[in-house]
């Protein structure tokens, strides 16, 4: 193994250690909405920053609190609490498990009032089920670290390249499997307490007859960590009772 290969192996080992360390440490995170754009290259775009989609808290006791931020369809935050994979979501009638959320019966189209705002029940249920399905973000990282094709460190950041299969799974649509060209990079920034943030940059490319090059459709999103080692998830009494049922 040459010097450059040894350096890349060391970079990969260091990044893996940082990710597994985060998985054992309490933290708060924020993940942005996915930004989509077109271009002639796979260069990321970080300005202006995207709005936050998910805020979450994770602690070593196995608790995860997830808050989906308001959207046009559901203009209020939607909260879910997970304990070792068992999830409940906060509704106007209290904390409910996923099966209770789905059991709408004849009330499927009834409106519900949340924080003084009226929301179609079906839309709220979809958002609540989505919140209850959100995993701790470090679990997504642990899945990715298995698939990293290569890792290198440049100018203080880690650049991890994803293989084709991981890109297709992360893209979120069937068009990635049809694309003749795909691109996937995860950019990690490290702080004093571990990984400070990471940015996922995905691209699918098709031949561009006009330019004779590749026309890229890109997706990117970012996650930032805070309160590393100092986050404790407070469990509301109603949530604890719902989880214990």
Image (cartoon, helix red, strand yellow):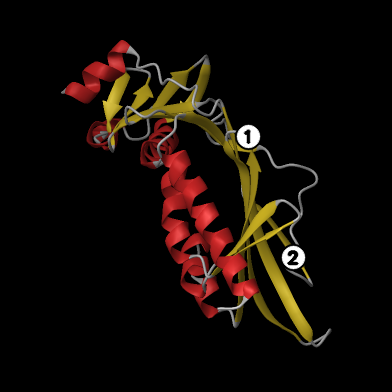
Q: Secondary structure at mark 2?
A: strand
Q: Quadrant of the N terminus?
A: bottom right
Up-down relation of residue 9 to residue 233 (above or below): below
Residue highlighted by disc 2: 38
Q: Secondary structure at mark 1?
A: loop
Visible residue check, residue 182: yes
Horizontal side of residue 52 vs 85, given as left or right: right
Up-down relation of residue 166 to residue 44 (above or below): below
Q: Quadrant of residue 12?
A: bottom right
Q: Which mark is residue 192?
A: 1
Residue at horizontal 43%, vertical 52%?
142
**Distance of label 2 from label 1 (alpha carbons):** 35 Å
Visible residue check, residue 68: no
Q: How many marks?
A: 2
Horizontal side of residue 218 vs 82, given as left or right: right
Residue at horizontal 26%, vertical 18%?
240
Residue at horizontal 49%, vertical 30%?
27
Q: Quadrant of the C terminus?
A: top left
Residue at horizontal 61%, vertical 66%?
7
Q: Quadrant of residue 102?
A: top left
Outermost residue, right direction? 211
Residue 59 image point, x, y percent: 40, 28
Q: Nearer the viewer, residue 100 or 65?
A: 65
Q: Are marks 2 and 1 in contact (CB under 8 Å)?
A: no
Residue 243 image point, x, y percent: 23, 25
- Mark 1 Cα-neighbour bin, 10 Å: few <14, some 14–19, many ≥20: few
Residue 40 image point, x, y percent: 79, 72
């Amino acid at each position: 193994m040459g010097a450059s290969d040894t350096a890349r192996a060391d970079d990969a080992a260091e990044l893996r250690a940082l990710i597994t360390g985060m998985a054992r440490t309490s933290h708060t995170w924020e993940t942005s909405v996915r930004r989509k754009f077109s271009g002639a290259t796979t260069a990321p775009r970080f300005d202006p920053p995207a709005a936050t989609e998910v805020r979450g808290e994770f602690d070593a006791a196995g608790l995860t609190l997830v808050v989906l931020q308001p959207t046009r369809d559901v203009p209020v935050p939607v909260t879910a609490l997970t304990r070792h994979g068992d999830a409940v979501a906060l509704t106007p009638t209290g904390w409910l498990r996923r099966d209770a959320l789905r059991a709408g019966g004849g009330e499927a189209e009834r409106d519900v009032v949340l924080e003084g705002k009226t929301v179609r029940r079906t839309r709220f249920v979809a958002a609540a089920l989505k919140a209850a399905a959100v995993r701790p973000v470090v679990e997504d990282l642990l899945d990715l670290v298995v698939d990293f094709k290569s890792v290198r460190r440049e100018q203080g950041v880690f650049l991890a390249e994803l293989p084709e299969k991981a890109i297709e799974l992360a893209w979120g649509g069937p068009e990635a499997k049809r694309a003749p060209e795909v691109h996937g990079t995860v950019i990690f920034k490290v702080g004093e307490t571990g990984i400070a943030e990471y940015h996922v940059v995905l691209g699918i490319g098709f031949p561009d007859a006009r330019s004779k090059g590749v026309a890229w459709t890109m997706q990117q999103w970012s996650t930032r960590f805070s309160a590393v080692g100092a986050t404790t998830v407070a469990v509301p009494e109603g949530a604890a009772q719902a989880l214990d049922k």
